Image (spheres, rainbow, N blue to C red):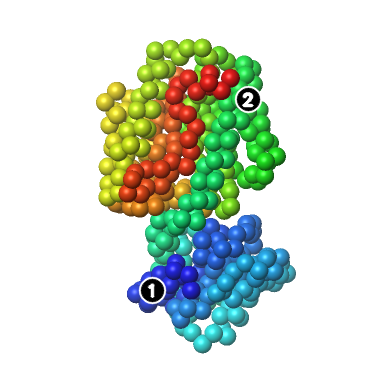
Amino acid sequence: MKKPIQKIINKMMEENVDIAFFDNPNTVYFLTGFRSDPHERILATIILKNGTSFLFTPALDEKDAKNIVEDFEVFSYLDTENPWEIIKNKLSKENHSLLNWAIEKNYLTLLKKEYLESAFPESHYNHDFSNTLELLKLQKNPSELEKMKQAGYWADESLRIGAETLKVGITELEVVAKIEYELKKRGIKQMSFDTMVLFGKNAASPHGEPGNNRLEKDQFVLFDLGVVHNGYTSDVTRTLFFGDQPSEHQREVYETVLKAHDQAMQQVQIGMTAEELDAIARDVITNKGYGVYFNHRLGHGLGQSVHEYPSIMSGNKLKLDKNMCFSIEPGIYITDDVGVRIEDCGYLDEVGFHSFTSFPTDIDTYKHLK
């Protein structure tokens, strides 16, 4: 039995939970090794307190699932069948209590919960294992770290493609299209999230949307992107200067963000809390008078999902530990003026923070690539 499954069963024993039902595809992949996007269909891992475990899939995924998973009994349903009735009939054959359920409240929709309640009206759904699952995913094993390093390599490649595409008059969307086209030619099927390329003032929106804005000289270009590779994600941000010489104001903003980024990367260590790490970067920006323009947390966890636990922010007293993976991404965003963010994701060990990405961060990077 896989270690995460045993830990879930131990938690079930502690809380007197009879059955766990998880329908988050990322959780299913984490627990079973089977990855699929069910779209509107039902894909779920079902674990009984006695250790019996099931993987419930759409019929079209059943064969693939059986070829991949171990220690799980795979059963499925046709589109013409009621999945909740299939689950009910399957579980009713088990000589096992189904009274107390554990669910993943941060994913299970209200509609699906109502379907479960209709199929199992005597049951209770009061145990939320969202945090339990987050903690299980928190520290990556060597195999996971290797996959994330590979995903980081392709994020760096994405930046190189984007930087080499820049020219006066090109639009943000054209750069996005070039990056994703070239990656698909090289076998990368999926981005971690919608690729972000923002020129000039548009970069002052932390989660801006690329459009038909055309590139001009002496503008910042903000890239925020990542890929999904072997089931794991990457995430990186660079802000390049496109032109001959940044203004004094542009350089000060950029170098302030870079200093915050570098100090956080260099000073983070095992045993430090998430809020202490946030403070290292935030204090740099605040002391330069730009604190009000750094309006988000310093970072987030990542793995199979691009945003996972923990949040690296004020108020989070979680102690950082070995093989935790997270981002460090300070930024300054001045509306109608300038936006700069620099982000690297990596993992922590006894030596320090190891970034999955290595694209240069000096303000003259674009010139080096021309």
Q: Residue 310, image x and y in percent?
A: 38, 50
Q: CA distance from mark 2 to mark 1?
A: 53 Å
- Residue carrying label 1: 10
Q: Nearer the viewer, mark 2 or mark 1?
A: 2
Question: Secondary structure beneath disc 2?
Answer: helix
> Position of 72 compared to 100: left or right?
right
Residue 182 visible in the snapshot = yes
**How far across and down, in percent of the image, does residue 359 sit?**
50, 32
Horizontal and vertical percent for residue 116? 54, 71
Please state which of residues 274 and 165 is positioned toward the viewer in this rendering: 165
| Picture disc at residue 38 | none
Residue most toward the front?
351
Quarter of the picture holding the C terminus = top right
Amino acid residing under circle 1: Asn
User: In front: 66, or 75?
Assistant: 66
Q: Position of residue 152 (x, y in %)?
A: 52, 42
Label 2: how many residues lie within 10 Å, few (<14), some (14-19) or many (20+)? some
Q: Residue at x 38, y 71 (%)?
A: 11
Q: Which residue is mark 2?
A: 165
Q: Residue at x 61, y 25 (%)?
A: 164
Looking at the image, how many numbered discs can be counted on the residues?
2
The residue at the point 51 percent across, 61 percent down is 30
Label located before the other in sequence (2 or 1) = 1
Location of residue 8 by image quarter: bottom left
Look at the picture and state if 365 lies above or below 141: above
In-front residue for pair 293/278: 278
Element at label 1: helix
Residue 76 vertical position relative to residue 267 in the rendered view, above or below = below
